[in-house]
Image (cartoon, rainbow, N blue to C red):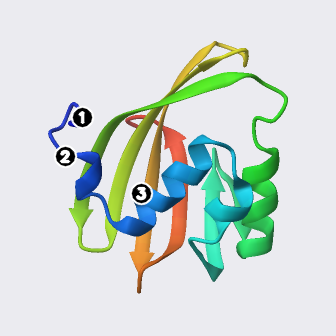
Amino acid sequence: MTHQNGLRSDALPATVRGFLAAHLVRDAGTASSFFAEDAVAVDQGESFRGRERIHAFLRDAGAEFEYTTEQIGAARVDDGHWVVTLRLEGTFPGGVAELDYRFTIREDVVTELVIANHGS
C-alpha cells in the first residue's frame, strides 16, 4: 500500500510493521513485545516507562470506545526514527483523530514511541 507521502508500508522496519499489525487488532501482548525492556511510550504527554507499563497502556488506552484505525501516512526520518500517521474514527469525543506514532528503533526494538496529534 502506498500512503500520502509515498512510503509504502512494506518499506517500514519489521519492528514497526509488527507493532502496528498487533496494535491495530488490539493485541497488547504482542504489540508490547516489540519494545525494549526499558522503553518509554508517551501518549498525549503522559509517559509509560518499561515494557510492563507499556503493555498496560496499550491494553487499556481507548478500551472504552469503539473505533477503526487506518494508516494514512509513513515517513523515515533517519535510520532509527520513523513516523506513522494513523486516522482513528469512532465513538470517542470528537469522533475523528489523526495521530502521529513517532518510533525510535535501536537494535530492532522500539526504545521510544511518542503518540501525538498529527502535525503537532
Residue 13 sits above or below residue 37 on the image: above
The one nearer the camera, 117 or 29, is 29
Q: Could you give the CA–CA distance between mark 3 and mark 1, rounded to whole angstroms?
A: 14 Å
What residue is rendered at 24% in x and 73% in y? 79
Q: Tell me the amino acid under the disc marked 2.
A: Leu
What residue is rendered at 20% in x and 36% in y? 2
How many numbered marks have been drawn onto this rendered protein structure? Answer: 3
Q: Secondary structure at mark 3?
A: helix
Image spot of residue 35 (x, y percent): 59, 73
Q: Could you give the CA–CA distance between mark 1 and mark 2, rounded to whole angstroms?
A: 6 Å
What residue is rendered at 21% in x and 46% in y? 8
Label for residue 17? 3
Label for residue 3? 1
Q: Tell me the amino acid under the disc marked 3.
A: Arg
Is 105 placed left or right of 114 in the picture?
Answer: left
Label for residue 7? 2
Point out the image quarter for the N terminus.
top left
Is 84 placed left or right of 11 in the picture?
Answer: right
Q: Secondary structure at mark 1?
A: loop
Most distant residue in the left direction: 6
- In primary-sequence order, the first of circles 3 and 2 is 2
Label for residue 25? none
Residue neighbourhood size for the residue with mark 3, other residues' Cα within 10 Å, grouped as few (<14), some (14–19), many (≥20): some
Image spot of residue 99 (x, y percent): 49, 36
Q: Could you give the CA–CA distance between mark 3 and mark 2, rounded to whole angstroms?
A: 13 Å
Residue 84 sits above or below residue 86 on the image: below
Q: Are marks 3 and 1 in contact (CB under 8 Å)?
A: no
Q: Are marks 1 and 2 in contact (CB under 8 Å)?
A: yes
